[in-house]
């Protein structure tokens, strides 16, 4: 298993297969889809496939701040995922909030996503490290690159080294060498 200490020996670009899609190949990939799977998801998936999407976002479980807001369809979304896959043949990527979610979705998705809020959920990261399915690890909003890499280590050290995709969504705005006033002016 390659550890971060050996990163200089690693290839500059690693390719990860997510279903039929190659991440890290000779072109960027387009992963598209609504925030959460709802009843019209198969139609949306077909439209996105026709527009050239390489994979589909398939939000079954939604991590929300407000407990009263929509939390996703949960297991009721599974038939919609299966229909979308049947109509498009595109890989499906779904955020999971727990190892139980990963087990439930194992036969229905091609990769798991760890959202920004769960980037530091050590138990989830470790459990996904023991599964041979690709994991898309989204960087937390205020996480440093070092914190993001450390989060990936929980997955890698449990054996899922070859199937890890990093998603760098935003950069941190506050530098350690700038005071709050300077950082806010940027």
Image (cartoon, rainbow, N blue to C red):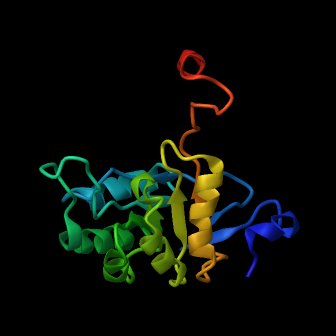
User: Could you tell me residue 125's position as x and y percent?
Assistant: 49, 71
| Name of the residue lying farthest toward the right | 9
Residue 119 shows in this picture = yes
In the displayed structure image, the side of residue 151 where residue 64 appears, left or right: left
User: Could you tell me residue 151's position as x and y percent?
Assistant: 56, 63
User: Could you tell me residue 55's position as x and y percent?
Assistant: 49, 61
| Name of the residue lying farthest toward the left | 68
State the residue in front, 139 or 165. 139
Image quadrant holding the C terminus, namely top right
Residue 54 shows in this picture = no
User: Could you tell me residue 104's position as x and y percent?
Assistant: 31, 81
Image quadrant holding the N terminus, namely bottom right
State the residue in front, 52 or 61. 61
Q: Which residue sits at x=36%, y=62%? A: 58
Q: Which residue sits at x=31%, y=70%? A: 81
- Within the image, what quadrant is residue 85 found in? bottom left
**Total labels drawn:** 0
State the residue in front, 120 or 35. 120
State the residue in front, 62 or 177. 177
Q: Is residue 183 above or below residue 31?
A: above
Q: Which residue sits at x=57%, y=37%? A: 172
In the displayed structure image, the side of residue 108 where residue 14 appears, left or right: right
Q: Is residue 37 above or below residue 123?
A: above
Q: Which residue sits at x=60%, y=17%? A: 182
């Amino acid at each position: 298993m390659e550890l971060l200490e050996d990163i200089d020996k690693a290839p500059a670009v690693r390719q990860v297969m997510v279903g039929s899609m190659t991440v890290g190949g000779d072109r960027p990939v387009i992963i598209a889809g609504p925030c959460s799977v709802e009843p019209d998801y198969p139609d949306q998936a077909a439209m996105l496939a026709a527009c050239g999407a390489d994979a589909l976002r398939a939000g079954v479980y939604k991590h929300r701040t407000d407990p009263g807001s929509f939390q996703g369809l949960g297991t009721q979304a599974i038939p919609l995922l299966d229909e979308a896959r049947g109509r498009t043949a595109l890989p499906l990527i779904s955020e999971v909030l727990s190892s139980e979610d990963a087990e439930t979705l194992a036969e229905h998705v091609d990769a798991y996503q760890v959202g920004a809020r769960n980037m530091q959920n050590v138990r989830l990261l470790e459990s996904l490290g023991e599964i041979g399915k690709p994991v898309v690890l989204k960087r937390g909003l205020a996480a440093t690159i070092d914190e993001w890499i450390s989060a990936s280590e929980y997955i890698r050290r449990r054996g899922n080294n070859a199937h890890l995709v990093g998603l760098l969504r935003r950069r941190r705005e506050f530098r350690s060498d700038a005071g709050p006033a300077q950082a806010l002016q940027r």
